[in-house]
Amino acid sequence: MPTDGKHDTGYRLLFSQPEMVRDLIRGYLAEEWIRWLDLDTLERLEECNREPALEPLNEIIVWRLRWQGGSSWVHLILKAQMEKDPAMALRMGLYRELHYHELLRRRATAPLPVVLPLVLYCGAGRWQAPRDSLELFLPLLPALQRHAPRTRYLLVDTAHDPVSDKAGADNLVSLLCKLERSRTPDAVDGLLERLVALLSEAGNEALRQAWSDFLGRSFLPRRFPDLFTPERAEAWALEVC
């Protein structure tokens, strides 16, 4: 399994695009409250100069959006992850607390927004790590449980979770999931034809470039290393997208 972080970077590029995040929310977050979010208010919180203690925030992408008809924000922190991490719940808790620290550093006032951690995973084998940090501790008396760190995170396993039926045929995250499951160049070709059509309809150069970078620098060299060197894959991806 590659560990150089290129795949994580490819996902960060893709999910820095609002179209990908909207399709993720629409099709892959199976939470009742999702329908109350106003997707038209979605916006990314850009990185800024941070103090050294906040450098781990460079590993995540932060988006925010409002409740429908409301003024309160909900923040979504996305972490691309290729390797399994049994303590992921604690890591996501750290990202969330650092994000709150960043908000306070920028003089945000109470009440603070709800921050939802989400892991985007595509690695070998299904994700089996606890999704609640409380599970990482020895059995605790109920009186002590409320003092233990508690973080629950959402998970999208693009290579193993079922492809969402409700997402629709034009959902870009569904297309990503199908690419992650493909095992032959012929299977990839058909999916890429659909991708080209969707990107042409969108007419969004930033989205097209993100997909091109993901395919050429991450997906193709990882999936077909004997057919695509990084240089060949990048040139091929530019032609496709």
Image (cartoon, rainbow, N blue to C red):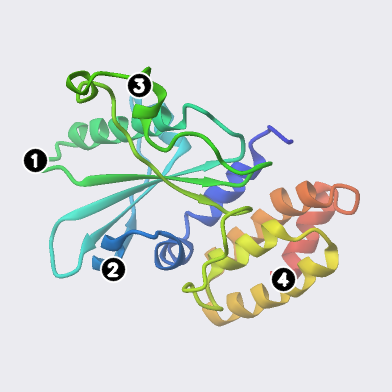
**How many angstroms separate mark 2 from mark 3 (CA)?**
35 Å
Residues at marks 2 and 4 touching, judged by CB atoms closer than 8 Å: no
- Specify the amino acid type for callout 1: Ala
Disc 2 is placed on an element classified as helix
139 to 88, vertically: above or below? above
Residues at marks 2 and 3 touching, judged by CB atoms closer than 8 Å: no
Q: Which residue is mark 2?
A: 35
- Which mark sits nearer the N-terminus, 2 or 3? 2
Q: Which image quadrant for residue 42? A: bottom left
Q: Which residue is mark 1?
A: 110
Q: Which image quadrant for residue 3? A: top right
Residue 84, position as x, y percentages in the image? 58, 34
Residue appearing at x 54%, y 56% in the figure: 14
Disc 3 is placed on an element classified as helix
**Which mark is nearer the camera, 1 or 3?**
1
Q: Residue furthest right?
A: 226
Residue appearing at x 69%, y 62% in the figure: 179
User: Residue 192's mark?
Assistant: 4
- Which mark sits nearer the N-terminus, 4 or 1? 1
**89 or 173, which is in the foreground?**
89
- Which mark sits nearer the N-terminus, 1 or 3? 3
- Specify the amino acid type for callout 4: Leu
**140 or 219, which is in the foreground?**
140
Residue 199, position as x, y percentages in the image? 59, 75
**Which mark is nearer the camera, 2 or 1?**
2
Does residue 74 appear to the left or right of 27 in the view shown? Answer: left
**Which mark is nearer the camera, 4 or 3?**
4
Q: Which residue is mark 3?
A: 53
Callout 2 crowding tier (Cα within 10 Å): few <14, some 14–19, many ≥20: few
- Specify the amino acid type for callout 3: Ala
